[in-house]
Amino acid sequence: MNEMNDILLEVKDLAIEYRTRKSLVQAVNGISFQVPRGSTLGLVGETGAGKTTTALGIMGLIPVPPGKVAGGEILFQGEDLLQKSPAEMRAIRGKRISMIFQDPMTALNPILTVGDQICEVIRLHEKLSKHEAVAKAKEMLELVGIPGERYGEFPHQFSGGMKQRVVIAIALACSPMLLIADEPTTALDVTIQAQVLLLMNNLKKELGTSMILITHDLGVVAETCENVAIMYAGEIVEMGTLEDIYEHARHPYTRGLFDSIPDLDVEQDRLKPIAGLMPDPSALPVGCSFAPRCPYRTAACEAAPVGSTQLSPTHCVRCVRAGELAGGKEGGQA
């Protein structure tokens, strides 16, 4: 395990909820994970699993009301971000922690040039003159593969892939220690996806940036991440190294995700989807949230909350039958 001084970010028992007039939505339910310096953590799960809410919690961007961080700690370089004032968080955002938001088409301001949008972040956090900030903004464009002379162009003059590069340039403008990338390749075709992932990997190596990659694409995770956390209904149900998750997955949900991917080496008529739907976050089951969809469920799964089991120093799983599921996909509904 890493020494504590190698841990850049540590999230402990984080709970985030949204209160409406009719219900209490438990978006994130006591999750814990670490991001060592210079590494990438993949946060994987279906839409609605709580991945983006977790990221917004780290950034201090949960809308209050209706949202609220209901408990836990977010330790960045040993300091709890939840104890910071709004002004202190504004100084941290963009400078020490940056986020690439989900849709590059809407992340950019349509009435400002792309150069001015990069320049704005630089001048906000660094004591540079306008001339120096413009020069650095052009450098950032070049760094992400866009000619510096396009500084004065507007977002509508760029393709989707180029817009995403601009968003990455904005996020990296002040050399953050932690980069949170929320579905950075979702709106892009596969060729541009590959280019953006290669760019992010290269920049991570060059700048020594740690990263949290939020995605539902297990192929993207395999290309980019050292560690993986599988989220379901606001909980981390399995977490480990890339090898732990891809070679020794123990949670039925993790296995279901892999089973639903086409195998190019096997002739298949149909894919194998996970049956059912994710539970309503305002009415979560008493026991395991995945139990209603799980082919391995027992009465114990539905009777009480399921704790996390440590399988190895790097691998943990939230499943009462994790020990039985070690050797393959045999087993059945009890």
Image (cartoon, rainbow, N blue to C red):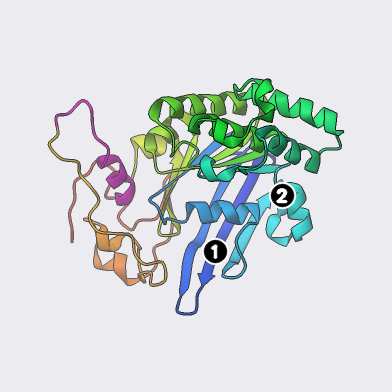
The amino acid type of the residue labelled 1 equals Ala
Q: Residue at x 51, y 24 (%)?
A: 198
Q: Is residue 291 something that shows in the picture?
A: yes
97 or 118: nearer the viewer: 118
The amino acid type of the residue labelled 2 equals Gly
Q: Does residue 213 lie above or below 69 as drawn?
A: above
Q: Residue at x 46, y 69 (%)?
A: 25
Separation of marks 2 and 1 at Cα, in angstroms: 19 Å
Q: Does residue 24 lie above or below 177 as drawn?
A: below
14 or 139: nearer the viewer: 139
Looking at marks 2 and 1 on the same chain, the residue that comes earlier in the sequence is marked by 1
Specify whether 135 is left or right of 246.
Answer: right
Element marked by disc 2: loop
Residue pointed to by mark 2:
78
256 falls in the magenta region = yes
158 falls in the magenta region = no
Residue pointed to by mark 1:
15
Q: Residue at x 69, y 32 (%)?
A: 115
Specify whether 188 is left or right of 178.
Answer: left
Quarter holding the C terminus is: bottom left
Report x, y in % for residue 318.
39, 55
Mark closer to the observer (2, 1): 1
Report x, y in % for residue 7.
64, 42
Q: Quadrant of residue 200?
A: top right
Element marked by disc 1: strand
Instruction: Count residues near mark 2 (Cα–Cα under 10 Å), then give few for <14, some for 14-19, many for 20+.
Output: few
Quarter holding the N terminus is: top right
Q: Which residues are magenta?
A: 252-267
87 or 150: nearer the viewer: 150
158 or 8: nearer the viewer: 158
